[in-house]
Image (cartoon, helix red, strand yellow):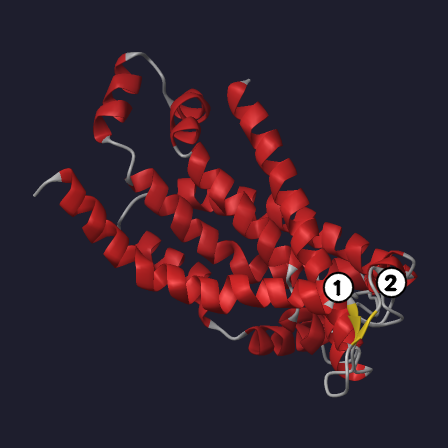
Amino acid sequence: MTAGHIRRFLIAGLLPALLIYTLFVFVPVIWSAYYGFFNWNGMGAMKFIGLKNYVEIFHDSVFWRALKNNVVFVLASVFGQIPIALILAIVLHKNNMLQRFLRSAIFIPMVLSSVIIGMIWQYIYHPQIGILNFLLDYLQLGSWKLQWLSDERIAIFSMVPPLVWSFVGLYLIIFSSAFQNIPGDIHDAALLDGATGARKLFSVTLPMIWSTVQVAIILCISGSLKSFDLVYVMTKGGPAHATELLATYMYNSTFTVYRYGFGSAISTSIVLISLIFIGTSQWLSNRAAKL
């Protein structure tokens, strides 16, 4: 088979997936950006208003509160999920029955619906019957009991544990697979050169899977910026917008007050903010890799 035949075969294989992606992802993004220039309630005639929706967004204090909360989610994901998953992947790198069971147990939250996870953590944080406050009473730390989801000072931070717990299993599996794909010859060469323990980990193993870590960071950032269901189930963005995220801000602006043009502008802003965050993270991670 010639190179031309192989190229045509690859194009024919990729074309259906590319068409589906274009139809269901790329085209809606373009349409959403287009609707962002209009004042539209979803049913009547659309009125072109230029950049007024975007100007209103950047003058809305709720938008900045939602962006700040999303930054908290991004930092919690990148510096919570990634390190925990890496540590667990290192500890559970062997393929015996116990460690396979532990990996499966840690992965279980990924199988559960976000609605179920939100309901579970609602009960954990419940001020009267929640297991967290009960545990604090049992440990004679009753002064530490708080209104975890009702106090606007701490509500957004109370969302971090369920967020990390929900997705750490995914990155554990990703990193475990990356560790297993490192050729055994590299491990043998490292041992011959005297690299063991932490030195082998930081000088050989982690550099070999750095591209996988970069992909995981991208997934963390994009997933955090579009987080919706967990927060909506637990707090609906309250109290007083204390847990409002960009996605819940968009949902409330679109489907509560029926401002589809404004909601489309918010969704376009989320895409642009995601690109900025991802680009910045890749620049920083590439610089870290060269050090």
Instruction: Relative to 4, say whether 148 is above or below.
Output: below
Name of the residue lying farthest toward the bottom = 43
> Residue 174 appears at what percent x and percent y?
40, 49
Left/right of residue 247 with respect to residue 97 in the rendered view = right
Q: Where is residue 165, by image quadrant?
A: bottom right
Q: Amino acid at mark 2?
A: Lys
- Residue neighbourhood size for the residue with mark 2, other residues' Cα within 10 Å, grouped as few (<14), some (14–19), many (≥20): some
- Of residues 209 and 125, which is closer to you in this image? 209
- Of residues 220 and 157, which is closer to you in this image? 220
> Residue 264 appears at what percent x and percent y?
72, 68
Task: Name the element at disc 2.
Answer: helix
Instruction: Relative to 53, say whether 173 is above or below.
Output: above
- Residue neighbourhood size for the residue with mark 1, other residues' Cα within 10 Å, grouped as few (<14), some (14–19), many (≥20): many
Q: Is residue 173 visible?
A: yes
Q: Residue at x 58, y 73 (%)?
A: 117
> Residue 155 appears at what percent x and percent y?
80, 64
> Residue 2 appears at what percent x and percent y?
10, 40
Q: Amino acid at mark 1?
A: Ile
Q: Which residue is mark 1?
A: 266
Q: Residue at x 19, y 52 (%)?
A: 9
Instruction: Relative to 127, say whether 4 is above or below.
Output: above
User: Which quadrant, please, contains the C terminus?
Assistant: top right
Q: Residue at x 34, y 52 (%)?
A: 99
Task: Name the element at disc 1.
Answer: helix
Q: Which residue is mark 2?
A: 52
User: Which quadrant, please, contains the N terminus?
Assistant: top left
Instruction: Relative to 291, say whether 223 is above or below.
Output: below
